[in-house]
Structures are given as structure tokens and as C-alpha cells.
Image (cartoon, helix red, strand yellow):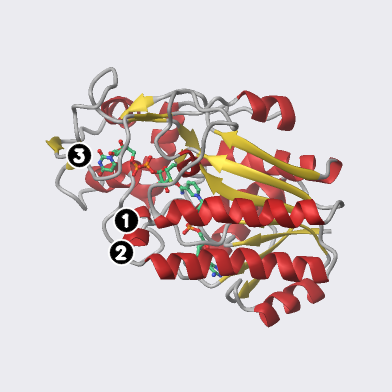
Amino acid sequence: MAVLLTGGAGYIGSHTCVELLAAGYDAVIIDNFSNSSEKVLERIREISGRSVVCYNADVCDESALRRVFSENKIDCVVHFAGLKAVGDSVKHPLEYYQNNLCATMTLLKVMNEFDVERIVFSSSATVYGVPKSTPIREDADRWCTNPYGWTKYMSEQIISDTAKADGNMSAVLLRYFNPIGAHESGRIGEDPTGIPNNLLPYITQVAVGRREHLNVFGNDYNTHDGTGVRDYLHVVDLAKGHIRAIEYAQKNTGVIAVNLGTGNGFSVLDIVKAFERATGIRIPYKIAPRRPGDIDACYADASLALEKLGWKAELSIDDMCRSAWNWQKNNPNGYGE
Ligand code: NAD
Ligand code: UFG
């Protein structure tokens, strides 16, 4: 029995693949490499000593998906595939709705044809929009502020309705907070194209000399030091959360939404200090205007993940910073030459 990872060559998918192989699962990937490199596959093999079947194809391509399901005995799908840049989604909404929703619907249709009943979906804390209070529980109001967020909101709805219509289906909607860091080997990690949107990749590119300084977007937020607070979690902890979710889906039917975060909030300046402490490298920064759409604070109530999945984040902010730096310094240009 194998687990199919859509978008499995990406940042979170590749780390999840490594953890799945280590736990004894077989893994199959389908990825169109729109935001990843085929080099990832070799690195996964190198770390795990096991190979992975990979299809270079689009999840929106029904016949390609049928081929994947007919050539492999798939027990469960983890659906990572999707476009994920918030700002880009505001500029190109149709591309985001087309890719992300089409991928979810095509996948569900073909899963149904092949009687595959279990799905774990990569959702996001973005579905909580501007939270009324923190920490955020799964039953908090949901409302999105950008097309990317709406694709997650709508995919959650599409998956839930499909699972409800089929009493045997099991769907785990994982709402990730802010994954950072990299595998301890330094062989796989986050490799954004162009100027990084996210904080940690930007910091590591400053550290490696690719950028001059960090722009801290706003220091007048309602937080302990005025800079934005988020719930950063180690991507390896996050990857392990997927294994717990697969196990849960094997034992339960129905739909459940679960936050994956640490439950702790750190500000931008906390992260800068943590990175400096963990690596000994100074990160020059300048206070810049607020980034449109950003919120004061966003962190999880992580108790449901412990209760239902038996999962809790274990690695520290120092571990996250150290591993992110280990990846960046060993791969100054990511997977590129
Ligand atoms: P990523 O871009 O590194 O990985 C996504 C992968 O999906 C890429 O390899 C890309 O090539 C592939 N892909 C995209 N559209 C596809 C399609 N139509 N067919 C086949 N492959 C396709 O992103 P990631 O950070 O690993 O995120 C994985 C998932 O988690 C995404 O759905 C993302 O929205 C979600 N998520 C990420 C974060 C984060 O901060 N990284 C936070 C919350 C949720
Ligand atoms: N920040 C900076 N400078 C930068 C980049 C970020 O100050 O160069 C700040 C932001 O203003 C924010 C914090 O660092 O306060 C974190 O920003 P990120 O862009 O790393 O993360 P976000 O919380 O904005 O967004 C991330 C993902 C989204 C996802 C969201 C909720 O990028 O896809 O978490 O899960 F929707």
C-alpha cells in the first residue's frame, strides 16, 4: 500500500516523503514541477536510501491521474499540490482558482473512481483571515483576505461535501501555521523562486549574502515589540504530523480540521534574534512600511492535534533557525547550480 503525495516534490511534500519512507510507507509522487526541482527526488533517495515513483504530470490532468492510480495501489492521498504565493494570487486570481480548485476536484473524482477513500489536505491558517482572538481554535470564524486563501477555504468545502456524500471517506484538513526550517541533512529545504516572500528564506538569503538587509514590515502592530507575531513550526515536525493524520484517516471516517502549529507566537524581531543566536550571524534589518494584508498576530491553539492525532511540535525555534541556515549555506542557490 502506498501513499500518493500530490505536489510531493515541493518544500513540505519532500520533507513528508522522507518521514513517510522512514516510517516504512511506500510513496508515490505526482508533481508538475511548476515550483520545484527534479533534483529533490535524488536528494530524497540519498537521505532515505529508498526510491520513490514520481510522475511528472499535472494533478488537473485526469488521464495522468488515472494512470497513477491504475499503476499503483494507493491507500491514501496527501494533497499538497497548489500555488501558494498570497501576493501573486491577488495579481493572478484566475490562475490560482483554476490550478488549486481544479487539482482538488480532479483528484477527488479520480480517487472516487479507484475507491480510494482517504485524503489529507494541506490547508492553511490563512482560512482564519483576521482572527478575532488568539490562540486560534479550529471552530473560529473563517474568512479569507486573498484568492489563495479562498482556494483553501473552497477546497476544504469541496473535500468536506465529497466526504459527507460518501460515508466511507475520511478527510483530514490540516491547517498549517508557518512552517520553516529544513531536514537536518541539509539536502532538502525551501527554495523560493525570485525574491522570497516569507520571513525565514529572506533572512537566510541575507545571511548568505544574496540580500543586503531584511525589511521588517511594520513595527507598530499590537504585539510585544510592535512587529508581527506568527506561529513558526519546524517543517520536520509538520511532516510527522502528516503521518499521524494518515494513521487517523485509517481508523476514522468523516471530516476533521486540525491546526498544525506549536501554539507559541514569535515576533519578526524575536526570529531575527533567534537566528543570530543559533548561527552567530548578524542580520542587518530596516524597519519598512507594513505589508498590505498582514495582521498583528496569528498563532494556533494546538490542543486538538494532540487530542485527535497524538501530535505535538517538538523542535525549538533554535532548531528551526539552525536547520534553515544549514540548508541555505550548503545550497546557496537552492537546487539551482
Ligand atoms: P511548494 O510550492 O514547495 O510545493 C507545492 C508543489 O506542488 C510544488 O512542487 C509544485 O510544483 C506542485 N504543484 C502545484 N500545482 C500543481 C499541479 N496542478 N499539479 C501538480 N503539481 C503541482 O509549497 P509548499 O510550501 O510545500 O506547500 C505545500 C502545500 O501546503 C500547498 O498546498 C500550500 O498552499 C500549503 N501551505 C503551505 C504553507 C507554507 O507556508 N509553506 C502554509 C500553509 C499551507
Ligand atoms: N516579514 C517581514 N519581512 C519579510 C517577510 C516577512 O517583516 O521580508 C514579516 C511579515 O510581515 C509577518 C511575518 O514576517 O509579520 C511572517 O511573514 P511570512 O510572509 O513569512 O508569513 P505569513 O504569516 O504572512 O504567511 C504565511 C504563508 C501564507 C499562509 C500564512 C498562514 O506565507 O501562505 O502563513 O498560514 F497563508
Q: Position of residue 204 (x, y in %)?
A: 30, 44
Return the residue nearer the eye: 302 or 210: 302
Where does label 2 land, which residue?
91
Amino acid at dot 3: Arg
116 horizontally vs 92: left or right: right
Amino acid at dot 2: Lys
Q: Is mark 3 within 8 Å of ligand 2?
A: yes
Residue at horizontal 72 percent and vertical 32 percent from the top: 309
Q: Which mark is residue 87?
A: 1
Callout 2 environment at 10 Å: few (<14), some (14 to 19), or many (20+)? few
In the displayed structure, would residue 18 be above or below residue 296? below
Q: Number of marks in the image? A: 3
In the displayed structure, would residue 44 be above or below residue 261? below
Q: CA distance from mark 3 to mark 1?
A: 14 Å
Callout 3 environment at 10 Å: few (<14), some (14 to 19), or many (20+)? some
In the displayed structure, would residue 328 be above or below residue 268? below
Q: CA distance from mark 1 to mark 2?
A: 7 Å
Q: Secondary structure at mark 3?
A: loop
The earlier-in-sequence mark between 3 and 1 is 1
Q: CA distance from mark 3 to mark 2?
A: 19 Å
Q: Which mark is residue 290?
A: 3
Image quarter in which the N terminus is found? bottom right
Q: Position of residue 27 (x, y in %)?
A: 72, 59
Residue at horizontal 27 percent and vertical 48 percent from the top: 205
Q: Is mark 1 within 8 Å of ligand 2?
A: no
Residue that sits furthest to the bottom in the current view:
63
